[in-house]
Image (spheres, rainbow, N blue to C red):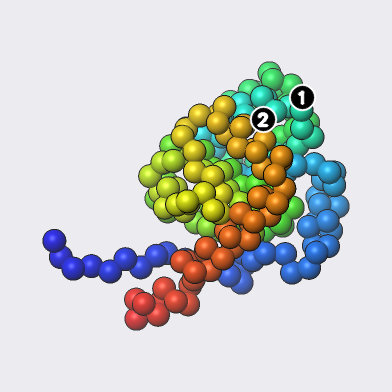
Amino acid sequence: HNPSIQINNWYNPAKFYPSLHLNEKEFIRKELGIVDNSLVLISVGGCSGVKNHIDIIKAIDLLNEKIPLLYLHLGNGTTETAEKELAKSLGLQDKIRFVGNTHKVRDYLIASDIYIMPSKFEGLSIAGIEAMACGLPSILYNSPGLRDLISNNDNGFLIDPDFRDLASKIKEYIDNPDLLKLHGKNAANFVVSNFSMQENVNKII
């Protein structure tokens, strides 16, 4: 019952920000060897049962025959081998790039179209905030620590934990490129408004 003030954590705007020019995405895709017309999905985080990347792979399997897509999987961890084995068993080796750990996170985010996080729970997802800061719309599972990042589906989709629903929302973005663009713009505005380093440090002071 003590009076309290909530001050949000923050991201580093000097490291994570939207494309500076129209050709940056195209240039980075060429550097990374990504085909121009691919729909690029991305997740950033260690491989574990909590992060639940298995659901992304299952969703891609549902979309595999219909859509030219690539999933950029950034991070290592305990479930990485199982995820690779699942991808291989489903014949998705060409659709999933296991990047591992990298210092070029922003490059991969800028090269991507949709950020996905199917975690069973999070603290506060700084990785999700950083993706939004780069102008990516997100599809997040409705779990503790993620539901704070999307309220009215105006900067992404907050969905029940189900890989079928995940596949459906990816398809919805594909069918509505204007919505994809709008949610990306709203995502960048959202994190600037709520997770600004300068503003939140000033609140603490």
Picture residue at 66% right of the left edge, 24% below the top = 62
Does the image show residue 98? no
Please name the amino acid that badge 1 sits on. Answer: Glu
Residue receiving disc 1: 65
Identify the disc placed on residue 60. 2
Left or right: 21 in relation to 12: right
Q: Position of residue 187 (x, y in %)?
A: 57, 58
Q: Secondary structure at mark 1?
A: loop
Give the quarter of the image for residue 117: top right
As measured in the structure, the alpha-carbon distance from the residue carrying label 2 to the one carrying label 1 is 9 Å
- Residue located at (67% from left, 35% from top): 171
Please tell me in which quadrant of the rendered image residue 173 appears.
Answer: top right
User: Image quarter for residue 100?
Assistant: top right
Query: Which residue corresponds to the image point at 63% horizontal and 23% vertical from the top-left?
Result: 86
Q: Secondary structure at mark 2?
A: helix
Q: On the picture, is 192 further left or further right than 147?
A: right
Q: Residue at x 53, y 68 (%)?
A: 192
Taking depth in this image into account, of 149 and 173 the one nearest to the observer is 173
Left or right of 199: which side holds 47? right
